[in-house]
Amino acid sequence: MRSILDIQKKLLPDLTETLKTRYTILHHVLVSRVVGRRTLASSLDMTERVLRGEVEFLKEQGLLESDSAGMRITDAGSELIERMAPIVHELFGLSELEARIRERFGVPQVIVVPGDSDSSPYTKRELGRAAAGVLRGVASKDDVIAVTGGSTLAAVADHLTPSAQLKGNWFVPARGGLGESVELQANTIASTMAKKTGGHYRLLHVPDHLGEEAFQSLIQDPNIREIVDVIRSARIVLHGIGEAMVMARRRKSDPAMLDSLRKDGALAEAFGYYFDKTGVVVHKMSTLGLRLEDIQRIETVIAVAGGRSKGESIGAVLRFGEEDVLVTDEAAAGEMLRQHESP
């Protein structure tokens, strides 16, 4: 297939660009579910006049439909998107990015979606859609699935639907609350995933950041102990990756802690652990959720994170070496490789 695409690029470059444009329009509508033409034109950085012509063509082909609420993709359009996925991966150079990350970071499965989620809400939604597909592919009956919080994991929850693979599974928070927006907390995301898939959920009503005295007190509570045991029995964990200093500030860490993280070269945070650029843990929080020893024995660990700003942080966590699947975007993938290959 690669050789055919290479020939097409040389002999019919205009056709290749047209294919990319029309696929991108269909894909944006698919991920958005319903979208107006003006909003779509803005998202694609395309004039409404040019977009109108492309949309009319796609409607004539039976791939899009519209009403007063906006445009939506048809069943035929959804099927075409699925069939085009391998071709588009080659056209956008995503297959090459995936292969390079697998080779350099030793991650068995890598999925790269187009765009940069730092600047495009659409790209973040596509990260969620791709990760939801991965979860459906690895889940089995009666699994315990631990999930962290954050906007990217909320996007994953938004794209889950009832399915045979996920029905009856237990969704649990991988850690306590960070004091952020309720809809972005791990508890909320776990319950949303369960409701959307026909599964079950358990909640952990404790802060993520605990002092040692509070930690020792809570871990003795039988109810807390029971849910913690369930969380640590997870077969699958789905988690985000944060920039170290951003996450430390969200936890309202004191200035001394921030200085310590800077001096230790902390770049990334996951599960309450801070990693330097080589993947070494330089600091850990007292948390009632998953510990590193739990992560190391969990069967399937799925990381979902994107945006150029997080590229170096994602690479740091991958060097720790426990990820089985990475779902990211092309901006983060490019930055990861640039950092890895620079002297």
Image: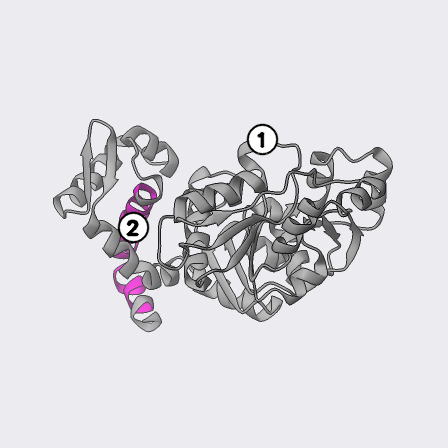
Looking at the rendering, the stretch of residues picked out in magenta corresponds to 6-29
Q: Residues within 10 Å of mark 2 (few under 14, many from 20)?
A: some
Mark in front: 1 vs 2: 1
Query: Horizontal placement of 234 versus 157: left or right?
Result: right
**Residue at the location (31% across, 45% down)?**
30
Question: Residue 8: x percent and y percent?
Answer: 28, 65
Give me the C-alpha separation between circle 1 and circle 2.
Answer: 35 Å
Please give the residue where the numbered disc 1 appears in the rendered image: 181
Image position of 11 (left or right of 327) = left
Closer-to-camera residue (63/203): 203
Q: Residue at x 62, y 49 (%)?
A: 174
Q: What's the residue type where badge 2 is placed? A: Tyr
Mark linked to residue 23: 2
Query: Residue 271 placed where, x, y %?
Result: 67, 50
Q: Quadrant of the N terminus?
A: bottom left
Residue at horizontal 38 percent and vertical 63 percent from the top: 90
Classified by dominant secondary structure, the portion drawn in magenta counts as helix
